[in-house]
Amino acid sequence: MRPLTAIALSGGIDSLMAAHLLKEKGHTVIGVHFVTGYEDPSPDNGQSTHLIKSHKIFSIAKQLGIDIKIFDCSIEFKKNVVDYFIRTYEAGQTPNPCMVCNPSIKFGTVYDFARKLGASVLATGHYARITLDKKGKFHLYKGVDPKKDQSYFLARLTQQHLAGACFPLGTMTKSDVVKLAADKSFKPIKTSESQDVCFIKGRNYGDFLARHEGFEPKPGLIKDIRGNVLGEHKGLHLFTIGQRRGINCPASDPYYVIHMDTRQNVLTVGFKKDLFVSQCKVENISWIDETPSTPMDVHTRVRYRHMAAASRLTPIDGKTAMVRFEKPQAAITPGQCAVFYKKDEVLGGGWITPDKTYEF
């Protein structure tokens, strides 16, 4: 019998079909549905969804013919992901919770649970690819579907993480997955695409943050890049670099958020041309394979929907680098993750830091 393979099942079509493909290849498969505590109905109304036998996820078990275990990781999720999300906004930056969740929860806490079940590998429905070279090193690559590629979100996985990971959909397109599901008469219980911030249901970020004890919105001034006062904001947590909505300051052209100063609680806005910068500093970089010691040419993606841009990466130390783009890039946002590519291979990723030399 082949070793047991666990599959993280959300109820969506991607993880459903990933599980099916594993079974088709002869794997012995067990499903793991992990509960974060932020599912509907949410914990705000005192109800809980975990460990309920009538949970809809078990309809997936019947379709696949596998066993599914429910795993409550709500304590770890709150500590590692939600608290990080809140702290980052309090610091005047824009968090990227998926970049934290994948290494700490999915391939951390959930993988540990899968190991206790006897599984040696945890599979997910991510569109990405893993290879193993002759030296025993793992490599992470983009999924073949450029519209669905999710390698960006996996860039902070380590060799240890990749050794226990499996992405069955990496060589497929989304349309192929949907067609295969229809051909096999599989029916997911979730029909919508996963949100970037899965734990915010039916609320905007500002409302979510305001409901947490100890988080206090701090109104302050809105200024242009010359220092002229244009109006007032209701809290820096309501904004991100490049944002246009919610500024509410009339001008000949639309204003965009250029900078957020948490020390003085000032929101600085400018016009679209003011969004472009030529470089950024990246800290706490997680390198998948070797840590570079000399400058190298890479393509850098500064957010998920950003097309990776040609750039020169200059290491400062093993965890820090300066990235200079061949062409200026718009809305480079502190708190987001910069991910480095060599062609289709992911080299690693780290956190974009505030430009402390930014003065007006």
Image (tube, rainbow, N blue to C red):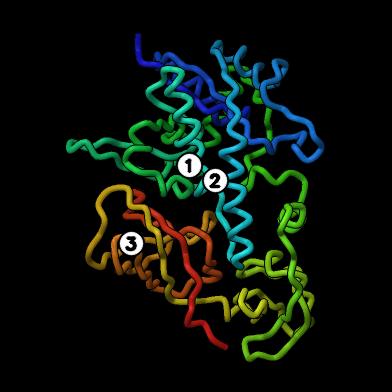
Q: Amino acid at mark 2?
A: Asn
For the point 46% across and 50% down, which residue is it?
Answer: 152
Q: Are marks 2 and 1 in contact (CB under 8 Å)?
A: yes
Q: CA distance from mark 1 to mark 3?
A: 26 Å
| Residue plotted at (51% across, 33% down) | 125
- Number of the front mark, 2 or 3: 2
Residue linked to disc 3: 298
Instruction: Using residue 50 as the reference point, say whether residue 306 is left or right of it.
Output: left
- Residue occupying the point 63% across, 66% down: 240
Instruction: Check disc 1 and report the residue beneath it.
Output: 104
- Does label 1 or label 3 sit earlier along the sequence? 1
Task: Identify residue type, mark 3.
Answer: Val
Q: Which residue is mark 2?
A: 80
Residue 19 x %, y % = 50, 22
Crowd class of label 2 (few under 14; some 14 to 19; many from 20; radius 10 Å): some
Say which element carries label 2: helix
- Dot 1: element: helix
Residue 315: numbered disc = none
In the picture shown, does residue 232 fall above or below 207? below
Which of the marked residues, 2 or 1, is nearer the chain's N terminus?
2
User: Is 192 on the left-hand or right-hand side of 305?
Assistant: right
Mark in front: 1 vs 3: 1
Q: Amino acid at mark 1?
A: Ser
* Residue 242, image x, y percentages: 62, 70
C-alpha separation, residue under disc 2 versus residue under disc 1: 7 Å
Circle 3 sits in a helix, a strand or a loop, which is it?
strand
Return the x and y of residue 177 as percentages of the image width and height: 53, 30
